[in-house]
Amino acid sequence: MSGVICILVIEDEAPIQELLCYSLGQAGFKVTTVTTAEQGLAEIRSELPSVVLLDLMLPGMSGVALARQLRSDARTRDLPLIMLTARAEEADRVGGLDAGADDYVTKPFSPKELVSRIRAVLRRRAPHLAGNPVDIGGVRLDPAAHTVTVAGQRVDLGPTEFELLQYLMHHPNRVMTREQLLNVLRGDHRVLMDRTVDVYVRRLRAALGPIGETMIETVRGTGYKLTSPPR
């Protein structure tokens, strides 16, 4: 995985919380734990995590209700979400998946299998976090080495510009709104405005040189698109 993957665990059983903190921490993830859906919502509003692990049965708002709420909000619609519960009946699994969960893991669980499932969900839902190098039009980004090259020549990017390019390169030929890009860049509590994205895009284009001007298009009134040249 590239960078730090932040996992929010919403689980009210202390032994399960401790197991998840230890096993996910050993796998290199940063873990935050809360015990209620309401606390989870507050954390998500403050800082968008990379993945949410959500218990089905919680005091107050249920895990299913929280999942539905997250999927109904544009900011969290694509947030990777894994249900973690002792209820293994088919109806419960179907209910969790219908509510928007990307996967459904029953207790007791194998920590190694859970880590594998988290990585699989990230590859599907958030490929820009999965750590795979990507090449487009002579630009190569390697998250593991944290390097960017243009025609084989290394380019120095600031952390925000790197993060922005990584997201755009994993979503080529798709128009990304400023709001979508802000959600990507809000992970460390930066206070950002819509037009701040424009500043980072200008810096990114300048760092990439002439290819940056042609590859990263402005979509007037909406946002930006990274164009992948035809092969």
Image: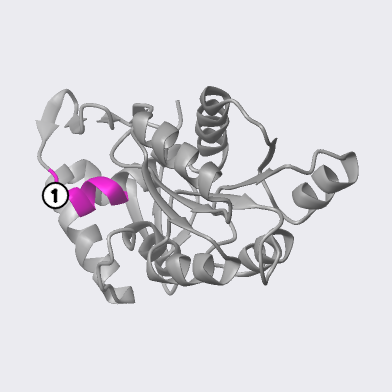
How many badges with numbers are in the image? 1
- Residue 64, by quadrant, is bottom right
Q: Quadrant of the C terminus?
A: top left
183 to 129, vertically: above or below: below
Check the image and report above or below for 171 versus 47: above
**What kind of secondary structure does the magenta stretch mostly adopt?**
helix
Residue located 51% across and 33% down the image:
123
Query: Visible in this render: residue 215?
Result: yes
User: Which quadrant holds residue 199?
Assistant: bottom left
Q: Is residue 68 magenta?
A: no
Which image quarter holds the N terminus? top left
Residue tagged by mark 1?
158
Q: Which residues are magenta?
A: 157-164
Is 158 within the magenta?
yes
Residue occupying image coordinates x 45% and y 42%: 18
Q: Position of residue 106 (x, y in %)?
A: 71, 36
Residue 158 location, x and y as percent?
14, 49
Q: Which residue is at 33% across, 31% downward?
A: 137
